[in-house]
Image: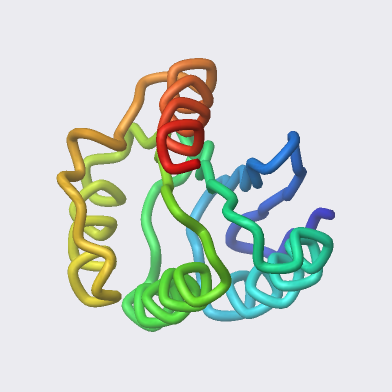
Amino acid sequence: MKFENNYGSYSLRVEGNIVIGQFKGNLNPELLNHFKAALLNIIEPFKHLPWGYISHSPEVIAATPDAEKNMVDVSQTMGTNNCLISAFVLTSPIAIRQLQRIMHSSGRDAHLQDCLFDDLPSAKAFIKSQLTSAE
């Protein structure tokens, strides 16, 4: 699943019980509303089984303030749909600060440094180990 507008883009894919979202550019409400709908569709086959999420977004610059609110909603929705753990591949200092606020506001507080990675393979290894230990 993919979506693109004038500000940014995302794609979604599933590997086992891990959902990987790849974002690029600036995130705005339209992009995130589309992402949330696609995410709910893509996790439907899990039937509330535990799953993990990776945001592979080294090319994200930032989210608009309105989009940041949407991201809180998406994070809460993920939690209520049995997402046990998330990992993030981010390089933008602005996006990392926004992520800290989003995690706090969504009630999914975690030590950000524990789930922030430099590359996708490291994020996958983390998610796999967390899901395995949760079983």
Q: Is residue 64 above or below residue 131?
A: below
Q: Is residue 122 above or below residue 15?
A: above
* Coordinates of residue 57 in the picture (x, y in percent): 50, 40
Quarter location, residue 5: bottom right
Residue at 73% x, 49% y is: 12
* Coordinates of residue 93 in the picture (x, y in percent): 22, 41
Q: How is the image coloured?
A: rainbow
Of all residues, the one furthest to the front in this rendering is 135
Position of the N terminus by quadrant: bottom right
Residue at 42% x, 76% y is: 76
Quarter location, residue 63: bottom left
* Coordinates of residue 51 in the picture (x, y in percent): 59, 50
Quarter location, residue 100: bottom left
User: Left or right: 26 with respect to 69?
Assistant: right
Q: Is residue 97 above or below residue 107?
A: above
* Coordinates of residue 22 in the picture (x, y in percent): 61, 43
Residue at 54% x, 47% y is: 52
User: Left or right: 13 with respect to 117?
Assistant: right
Q: How many marks?
A: 0
Front-most of residues 81 and 116: 81
User: Left or right: 69 with respect to 3?
Assistant: left
Residue at 51% x, 68% y is: 78
